[in-house]
Image (cartoon, rainbow, N blue to C red):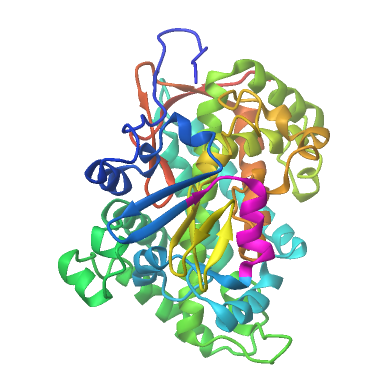
Amino acid sequence: MSAIDSGELPIVADPLPLGGHTNLRRSLRAMRQNAETAYGPEDFNADIITQRIFWRRMFVVNEPNAIRHIVLDNAANYTKSEVGRRLLEPALGRGLLTSEGETWRRHRRIMAPAFDPRSVAGYTPIMTRLTEQLLAKWDALPAPRELDVAAAMMELTLYIISNAMFSSDSDEIVASVERGVSTYQTKVRPSLPDLLHLPIWLSRLLAPLPTKIFSEFDLKVDRLLTERGKQPDAEPKDLLARLIAARDDETGSGMSAKEVRDQVVTIFMAGHETTSLALSWTFYLLSQHPEIEAKLHAELADVLDGRTPVNQDVARLRYTRMVIEESMRLYPPAHTFGRQPIVDDHILGHRIPAGAEVLILPWLIHRKPSLWENPELFDPERFAPERTGARPRFAYIPFGAGARICIGAAFAMTEATLILACIAQRYRLRLVPGHPVEPQGLITLRPRYGLRMTLQRRAH
């Protein structure tokens, strides 16, 4: 992707391919250090990629109708990836990302009202208030204002989810989660024993995972749950209270304290990370495309005229949303998700054995030339209604797809739209000259070196 900003050009690098899949050692290294580097230019065109790690079969499915088959039409035959569960369960427990079967369905039903449009609208004042507080801090910075935008967005979205979850923006809560997530991203990577589905006890013996990463956060959640338990009749106001009080319409049952804890940690992990990364990559792309940034500014001036946006503005900020959607096409925060068939299946002429690893990569399908014209270009107009309707439904899957699509997708898009609108009204962000930019596929798609940017105050 070319840089067109004035001045010294930044160093921009999409992950470089490692030269195919024949070298097991190099492929394994890619999976541990940067998942996207395991795939070469020819893989973006492929409908299905077959791989083998010793006796384990792996299939990368990169065709919309085949993805639909896996996540929707034949979803009952597919569970979440064993490798994914091994990596996530030690920290997340059995939250929505890792649970299966009736447990997952019951929890999804219980939690759905907390993320419906009315509930999301109730969170929007938190989103804008905390963003305005961040902007006030930026205003107070001495010139030249320079910071790591990726870190700033991570902290902002953590404060937002903390306030929405606990009615608190406690520095202690945010700091403990921030430390835990950073450690988890870099230390918890798939090992060869995990990829081979060796017994978990043996895998942990051969490749131990760091333990107690979220122990500090767990103590705070336990204390909050105990305190809330002493006030069972309190009206549910924040997300934690909603989860404690919620009941399944079909069974009348609620969630246990352990189940609430697992959902809280899952929401914190997934609920801030993906939004912060979507915004970070958006600010980077806008810094490289001033003509698109100018269109964004024009919409903000027309719709908001300098005022802080409210929930009703989200539907009117159409181009703002398109900018975020296109950013998530090029740099999907959730870049890979996996499934395993319970019984043998057939996809695109291939027999998929029961228990095989089936991977779906937004990173690949979002850049597939047969689905996206000039796929490397940053073009928000791709998400104009007339062009969106002409594409296959499963060509764009930044929040997953099917029944297990991210429950917080509406929350995330509302949050990202409001934050982008608030910040872009006041500042232009420009990449520090010479700063390297490289997407790194860990659990999420992070900028390997952060995003050092200068803040340029806009004149109104």
Residue 289 % position (x, y): 58, 19
Residue at horizontal 41 percent and vertical 80 percent from the top: 223
* 308 lies left or right of 97: right
Q: Quadrant of the C terminus?
A: top right
Q: Nearer the viewer, residue 259 or 106?
A: 106
Q: Quadrant of residue 123?
A: bottom right
Q: Which residues are magenta?
A: 60-75
Q: Is 315 placed left or right of 7 in the picture?
A: right
Which of the 4 image quadrants contains residue 164?
bottom right
Residue 316: quadrant of the picture: top right
Q: Nearer the viewer, residue 326 or 80?
A: 80
Q: Is residue 280 magenta?
A: no
Instruction: Indicate whether residue 74 is drawn in magenta.
Output: yes
User: Taking the image as drawn, is residue 453 in sight?
Assistant: yes
Q: Whole-percent x and y of residue 130?
A: 57, 49
Residue 348 on image: x %, y %: 59, 51
